Amino acid sequence: MKTAGRILGTAFFLAGFEVQDAPRYGAERRGAPIFAYVRASKRAINERGIIRRPDLVMVADDTLVAIPGAEVLSGVTAHTVLLISSSHRPEVWQERLNFPGLVLTLPAAPEVADLLALRFIGATCAGAGARLVGVISREALAQAIRDELAPLGEAVIAKNLEMALAAHDLMADHAGCVTEAQESPADTYVKPKWIDLPFDDARTSAPAIYTPATSERMPTGLWRTMRPVIDYDRCHRCAWICSTLCPDSTISINAEGYPRIDYEHCKGCLICMTSCPHHAIRATPEHEAA
Ligand code: SF4
Ligand code: SF4
């Protein structure tokens, strides 16, 4: 999705727009939700930061919709177009989400004959998005893909072009359905639900933790797509390695010196697996492990 944002941003730029594009994701982890956003305008863009009221939301993985932390629907309005890669029909999502705007879908995993093609979902989303905004030609889209993926070689570029242009064509009936929302006048501004923290006197300010240990209440294990599983027959009890390197401190050591993973909080980054010198940890797809 980071690459999708870059492709779409470059395509907008080639079409004569001012552009910002940026991804948002946490560090050192696999499997956590990420998003990327693109802001484009014919005028200079002075605003910075994430987009709070998106005109178009594209969801590459429909399982994210049910995860509150992914905030897929954050800021949507009746003006927003929602495009989901999903095997369910748009009407199903429309009803399920009670979504006020237009909902469209892209063929998802079970309908994609070659599962390897899922690697190209970013290009697919960029191609679909380019058509939905209605101001990006096939040529600009293709040039953006060539520009952004140039270091990856001709074969990768060709496959991404194929996927992006197919999605661009697939959205022909909805070309231009995404339009720029009118800016809200400043006097209608509604302050976000910030939590205001009192400002401490500079002479006394110091980290003030009023409610400690709240991270324990966050089941970050939900982020995991691959589960590290310890093979205790191979484990040499050198647990200072895996337990120390786990960035979330989710590996504890039992009385016999064996490591134990807290799956409530293991986010599946697999650093433990790659650092285990005895190859005693293997990765198992979460749905199989469950
Ligand atoms: S690093 Fe590997 S072998 Fe060592 S304790 Fe951890 S799982 Fe076992
Ligand atoms: S237990 Fe392994 S996979 Fe889980 S968070 Fe720690 S290092 Fe990452």
Image: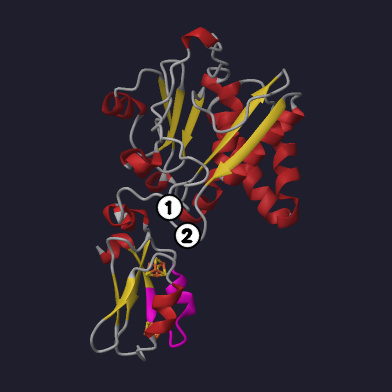
CA gap, disc 1 and disc 2 = 7 Å
Q: Please state which amino acid type lies under the numbered disc 1.
A: Ala
Give the side of residue 17 with respect to residue 159, left or right: right
Q: Secondary structure at mark 1?
A: loop
Instruction: Check disc 1 and report the residue beneath it.
Output: 32
Q: What color scheme is it?
A: secondary structure
Could you tell me residue 161's position as x and y percent? 66, 43
Q: Which residue is mark 2?
A: 29
Tell me which segment is drawn in magenta: 270-282
Asked if the residue under mark 2 is in contact with the one under mark 1, i.e. CB atoms within 8 Å, the reply is yes
Residue shown at 54%/14% (left/top)? 181
Q: Could you tell me if residue 53 is visible in this image?
A: yes
Q: Is the residue marked 2 within 8 Å of ligand 2, measured from its CB?
A: yes
* Residue 132: % across, % down: 56, 24
Rendered location of residue 205, percent (x, y) = 47, 46
144 over 266 or under it: above or below = above
Give ligand 2's quarter of the image.
bottom left
State the quadrant of the C terminus: bottom left
Q: Quadrant of residue 138?
A: top right
Disc 2 residue type (three-letter): Arg
